[in-house]
Image (cartoon, rainbow, N blue to C red):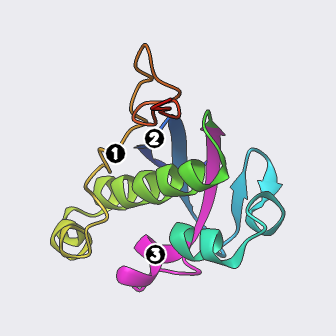
């Protein structure tokens, strides 16, 4: 196999292992093309953000293994992983990606359910009489 650069991205419950190869710009997620895996345009835009920020769209073939969470979380994890892999390839891209906010892991997680409540914050309906 050819030389590649690696990056691990995380978002919510999702983890994405990203491998960056020099190539024609094909992105595969879990061995499916990105168009079939992420069917919404917004999710594909999220995935392409680091490549657009560094003007490197079409220069790399990207292979991704995404696990856990839903499609939106996985798209965010892929974005984070691509940004980290780009930095592993070329350290000079760090400032560009940092300014765009693509190297920061989004810390927001699901709040855990509390006892005596329906969900984390929702209460049961109160009845005075």
In this view of the protein, which residue sits in the foreground, 98 or 74? Answer: 74
Tell me: 45 left or right of 83.
right
Helix, strand or loop at mark 2: loop
Q: Are marks 1 and 3 in contact (CB under 8 Å)?
A: no
Q: Which residue corresponds to mark 2?
A: 12
Q: Residue at x 31, y 52 (%)?
A: 88
In this view of the protein, which residue sits in the foreground, 90 or 28? Answer: 28
Would residue 3 be seen by someone viewing this image from the given angle? no
Quarter holding residue 121: top left
Could you say where residue 20 lies in the image, as x and y percent from the top left?
A: 52, 56
Instruction: Please report whichever mark, 1 or 3, sits nearer to the chain's N-terminal start.
Output: 3
Query: Is residue 53 magenta-colored?
Result: yes
Q: Residue farthest to the top? A: 115
Label 2 crowd bin: few (<14), some (14–19), many (20+), radius 10 Å: some
Q: Nearer the viewer, mark 1 or mark 3?
A: 1
Helix, strand or loop at mark 1: loop
Quadrant showing the N terminus: top right
Image: 107 above or below 21: above
In this view of the protein, which residue sits in the foreground, 11 or 89? Answer: 11
Would residue 28 be seen by someone viewing this image from the given angle? yes
Q: Which residue corresponds to mark 3?
A: 49
**Magenta segment boundaries in residue numbering:** 48-66
Tell me: 115 left or right of 98.
right
Q: Are marks 1 and 2 in contact (CB under 8 Å)?
A: yes
Q: Which residue corresponds to mark 1?
A: 108
Image: 81 above or below 115: below
Could you say where residue 99 lies in the image, as x and y percent from the top left?
A: 18, 75
Image: 40 above or below 54: above
Instruction: Please report whichever mark, 1 or 2, sits nearer to the chain's N-terminal start.
Output: 2
């Amino acid at each position: 196999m050819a030389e590649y650069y690696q990056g691990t991205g995380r978002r919510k419950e999702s983890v994405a292992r990203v491998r960056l190869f020099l190539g024609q710009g094909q992105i595969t997620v879990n061995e499916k093309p990105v168009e079939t895996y992420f069917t919404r345009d917004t999710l594909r835009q999220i995935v392409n953000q680091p490549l657009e920020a560094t003007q490197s769209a079409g220069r790399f073939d990207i292979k991704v293994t995404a696990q856990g969470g839903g499609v939106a979380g996985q798209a965010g994890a892929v974005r984070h992983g691509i940004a980290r892999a780009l930095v592993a390839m070329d350290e000079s891209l760090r400032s560009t990606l940092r300014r765009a906010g693509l190297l920061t892991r989004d810390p927001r997680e699901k709040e855990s359910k509390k006892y005596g409540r329906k969900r984390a914050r929702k209460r049961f309906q109160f009845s005075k009489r």
